Image (cartoon, coloured by chain):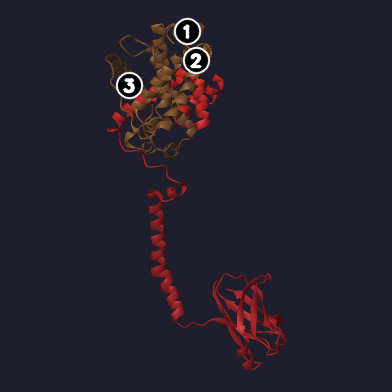
Chain colours: A brown, B red
Amino acid sequence: MEFYDEFDDDYLERLRADEYRTQKHFVGYFSKLLLIKLKPRLRSRQDVEDVQQIIFARFFQNLRKENGIRDAKCLGSYVNSICNNVLLEHYRRRVPEQIDDPIANTIPDPGKNAEQIVVDEETKRIVREILESLPERDQRILREVFLEERDKDEVCKDYGVSRSYLRVLVLRAKNKFREKMRQDPPGPKGKAAD
Amino acid sequence: MEHDEAVRLQMTEQYLLDELSPEAREEFEEHYFDCHECAVDVGAGAAFVEQSKIVLGEKAAVLVPRPAPAPSPWQVWFRPALVLPVLTMLLAVVTYQNFVSVPKLLEAANHPHELAWTTVNIGTLGADGGAIPVRSGEGFVLLLRIPPQGNYTSYTAELYDPNQKLEWTVTLPATVARDTSPRDRRAVQVPGAKRPPGTYSVIVRGATQGGGSEEVGRGSFELQVQ
């Protein structure tokens, strides 16, 4: 987090007071988490954005209610619980025959601004460095798991490794990524991913 | 869920690899929405996975195909390095059998030759039989004299080696035995085998009408291996 250590009462008050910087931080912080959570559950980028909008709208609506959100430390849980409710409502609304539509099951990348494009390119460069530092076999394993989305048990069997090896492989790669992002943050402003 | 537990259980990695049950996934989501450290970890992991797909997709075009799956223990035995020598050896054995062993056996089977023999008197007809001199591994003939007593449906002859271990049994039809005179003999060809020299016993049993069996008599002979 950039300008505070944790969600506290002061943060909550600034949110209630429509303080722009705090609101921007709140939306930016939870947008990332909501995207991670929603992406596997929804069929399209548009659905993800629609659900996110409803979640934030409902949050700010409740924030201003007298008996609304009181405990700043439970802000995350609160957003998560709104997300669960909105998701359930979304599922109920969805037309059944659309559920298994394979064509609609991809999430296209929305338009990006110049800064985001630079950040993405820098992030990609860091990821490429990390992947190239891995043994050939580990690169193949990651490609087949993440890119080809092969069955993980089969991939592990083919390469003679266990599921815990796969987990540790992801853990190490992710930790290297975090370390490099901290040392060499991408983007024109040098903004850290954390 | 506590943060330490999430770290210990590698929940972020399990989450990214979609290994969690729906309940565990929801529990972890509830946790990382509240836990800044886990939220950063999940965010970094998700970004890494997302960018990895792009980078690996670019690399996929230049990578050689994935290796063949690890062979099963059975497949190991069928590797060319093992199969070729084994097949060569088998071929040599088959060739030797076809051109050496089988012709010899055929010649032996198709050409008349003399077998060593002796008469073995069963039961009351006599005591010990004579001696049979044979070469090691060679067969011989036993002429069994079975007394035509009783009303047996068939006979069974059993051969015991010098250690009184049963070597084989052979069934003889009783009708032929009853039709022959007491002095007639039943020829039994004993196949060749590595036999120790010594006194061999033959016990003959008769099968009764009621389905039972009773000993008719026994005899013996001396096998001399040369």
Disc 3 to disc 1, C-alpha distance: 33 Å
Report helix, strand or loop for mark 2: helix
Relative side of B81 to B206, left or right: left
How packed mark 1 is, by other alpha carbons closer than 10 Å (few <14, some 14-19, many 20 or more), is some
- Residue type at tag 3: Lys
Q: Is residue A131 visible?
A: no
Dot placed on the residue nearer the N-terminal end, 3 or 2: 2
Q: Is residue B2 above or below residue B148?
A: above
Residue sitting nearer the eye, B122 or B199: B122
Relative side of A143 to B4, left or right: left
Determine the chain carrying the residue at label 1: A
Determine which residue is flagged by label 1.
Answer: A11
Task: Check whether the beta carbons of the residues at disc 1 and disc 2 lie within 8 A of each other.
Answer: yes
Dot placed on the residue nearer the N-terminal end, 1 or 2: 1
Q: Are marks 1 and 2 on the same chain?
A: yes
Q: Position of residue B225 (x, y in %)?
A: 59, 73
Determine the chain carrying the residue at label 2: A
Residue sitting nearer the eye, A114 or A193: A114
Determine which residue is flagged by label 2.
Answer: A75
How packed mark 3 is, by other alpha carbons closer than 10 Å (few <14, some 14-19, many 20 or more), is many
Determine which residue is flagged by label 3.
Answer: A124
Q: Position of residue B164 (x, y in %)?
A: 69, 71
Q: Residue A143 falls in which quadrant of the image?
A: top left
Q: Residue A23 falls in which quadrant of the image?
A: top left
Disc 1 to disc 2, C-alpha distance: 10 Å
Residue sitting nearer the eye, B217 or A46: A46
Q: Is residue B96 visible?
A: yes
How packed mark 2 is, by other alpha carbons closer than 10 Å (few <14, some 14-19, many 20 or more), is some
Q: Tell me which residue sits at (66%, 70%) in the image.
A: B165
Q: Tell me which residue sits at (63%, 87%) in the image.
A: B174
